[in-house]
């Protein structure tokens, strides 16, 4: 399970910036007049980003702090957290919608708190914070905070 998580993180890091994991072949650029308007900004996902997207779609491991989902506005992403009382807060509520949040039992028997997040706008990196508190007191200080990013293509 850790291997899958580490591989997903490595793919995300390679796709989001820094040095590419493997040498990249030169590409022929499409003239601007032939580029569809929908590909403005971040544009359509290339092969590396599609692989990262497929990896996070198949993932049922806990989503770590700082994780980056590669997604688009047609999808709903599932953030897996340890079971408990979590407060979910989009940094910019115009960029993502929290669709649902519930405890779910995974195939291995582990129980996760799964939060479904739907991107609303393209060409952004939306951030969502997840705060876990002991008990049900919303005013209590969080015992854990995670920030998860959604690169919306």
Image (cartoon, grey):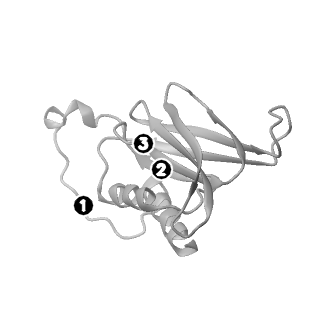
Which part of the image, by quadrant, shows the N terminus?
Answer: bottom right
Marker disc for residue 69 = 2
> Which mark lies nearer to you, 1 or 2?
2
The residue at which mark 1 appears reads as 26
Give the image quarter of residue 112.
Answer: bottom right
Q: Residues within 10 Å of mark 3 (few under 14, many from 20)?
A: some
Q: Nearer the viewer, mark 3 or mark 2?
A: 3
* Residue closer to the observer: 132 or 149: 132
Which residue is at 67% across, 43% downward?
A: 130
Whole-percent x, y for residue 45 in the image: 31, 49
Q: Which residue is mark 3?
A: 76
Residue that appears at 64% across and 45% down: 147
Q: From what the image shows, is residue 106 above or below residue 151? A: below
User: Of label 1 and label 2, which has the lower sequence position?
Assistant: 1
| Local crowd size for mark 1, using a 10 Å CA cut-off: few (<14), some (14–19), many (≥20) | few
- The crowding category of the residue bearing disc 2, from other C-alpha atoms within 10 Å (few below 14, some 14 to 19, many at least 20), is many
Whole-angstrom CA distance, mark 1 to mark 2, is 26 Å
Q: Helix, strand or loop at disc 1?
A: loop
Q: Are marks 1 and 3 in contact (CB under 8 Å)?
A: no
Whole-angstrom CA distance, mark 1 to mark 3, is 33 Å
Measured as percent of width and height from the top left, residue 120 is found at 42, 30
Quarter location, residue 44: top left
The C terminus sits in image quarter = top left
Could you tell which of marks 3 and 2 lies nearer the N-terminus? 2
Q: What kind of element bears circle 2?
A: strand
Q: Compute the Cα span from label 3 to label 2.
A: 11 Å
Residue 108 position, x and y percent, is 55, 70
**Quick one: label 1 or label 3, which is nearer the N terminus?**
1
């Amino acid at each position: 399970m850790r291997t899958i998580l580490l591989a997903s993180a490595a793919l995300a890091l390679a796709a989001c910036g820094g040095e590419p994991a493997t040498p990249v072949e030169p590409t022929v650029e499409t003239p601007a007049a032939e580029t569809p308007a929908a590909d403005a900004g971040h544009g359509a996902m290339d092969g590396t980003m599609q692989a990262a997207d497929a990896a996070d779609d198949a993932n049922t491991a806990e989503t770590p702090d700082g994780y980056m989902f590669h997604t688009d506005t047609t999808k709903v992403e599932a953030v897996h957290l340890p079971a408990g009382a979590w407060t979910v807060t989009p940094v910019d509520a115009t960029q993502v919608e929290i669709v649902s949040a519930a405890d779910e039992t995974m195939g291995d028997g582990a129980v996760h708190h799964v939060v479904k997040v739907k991107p609303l706008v393209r060409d952004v990196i939306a951030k969502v914070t997840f705060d876990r508190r002991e008990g049900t007191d919303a005013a209590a200080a969080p015992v854990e905070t995670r920030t998860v990013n959604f690169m919306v293509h």
